[in-house]
Image: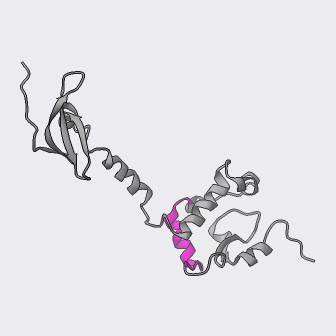
């Protein structure tokens, strides 16, 4: 005969067992649990004891958020420049891809790491306090790749003079 184990008051991961709350279709006991985030959820005794369920789902969301927010710059202008630069060169669904990636322009391997790009940017004249359009990334050789030796920070006016279809008269 099955021996009943009362899990009331026990903690499993982020979940604290509050009370028994019925049974699953395969006759395992369901427990009403309160997560550290404040939400309530029902979890079977098997999932609690095996460690399969450790939260209401917030643990997985927190892990994903932490992975994506590793550098803390997600909302910064520089991060947006980096993301857009990569998108133009690598995402075929991007409107600007035809002028960058499709023409062979790529981002160097080193700059696929945002931290390396950020270090280069601040070491080479990026100023986060300038007005929008006054400090933009520019490829010195408009046919070349995005890489440290071919990029600089300039105004939009300067960048407009340095493009493939510029004609000097």
Residue 139 visible to the viewer? yes
Residue 127 magenta-highlighted: yes
Quarter of the image where one finds residue 9: top left
Instruction: Please tell me which residue lies in front, 22 or 142.
Output: 22
Reply above or below: 54 against 143.
above
Q: Residue at x 40, y 51 (%)?
A: 64
Reply above or below: 81 against 55.
below
Figure coloring: one colour
Instruction: Please tell me which residue lies in front, 85 or 24.
Output: 24
Residue 152 locus on image (x, y percent): 66, 75
Q: Residue at x 44, y 64 (%)?
A: 71
User: Total number of numbered labels?
Assistant: 0
Q: Quadrant of the C terminus?
A: bottom right
Instruction: Please tell me which residue lies in front, 41 or 82.
Output: 41
Residue 13 visible to the viewer? no
Indicate left or right for 117 with 39 as reference: right
Q: Main secondary structure of the magenta part?
A: helix
Q: Range of the magenta residues?
A: 112-128
Indicate left or right for 1 with 66 as reference: left
Q: Residue at x 26, y 37 (%)?
A: 52
Q: Residue furthest top?
A: 1
Quarter of the image where one finds residue 125: bottom right
Indicate left or right for 133 with 33 as reference: right
């Amino acid at each position: 005969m099955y021996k009943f184990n009362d899990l009331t008051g026990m903690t499993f991961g982020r979940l604290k067992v509050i009370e028994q709350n019925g049974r699953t279709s395969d006759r395992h006991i369901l427990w009403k649990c309160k997560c550290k985030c404040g939400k309530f959820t029902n979890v079977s005794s098997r999932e609690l004891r095996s460690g399969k369920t450790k939260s209401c789902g917030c643990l997985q969301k927190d892990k994903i958020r932490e992975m994506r927010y590793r550098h803390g710059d997600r909302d910064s202008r520089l991060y947006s420049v980096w993301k857009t630069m990569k998108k133009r060169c690598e995402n075929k669904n991007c409107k600007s891809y035809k002028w960058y990636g499709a023409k062979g322009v790529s981002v160097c391997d080193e700059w696929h790491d945002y931290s390396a790009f950020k270090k280069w940017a601040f070491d080479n004249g990026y100023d986060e306090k300038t007005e929008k359009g006054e400090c933009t990334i520019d490829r010195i050789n408009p046919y070349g790749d995005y890489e440290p030796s071919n990029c600089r920070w300039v105004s939009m006016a300067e960048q407009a003079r340095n493009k493939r279809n510029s004609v000097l008269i």
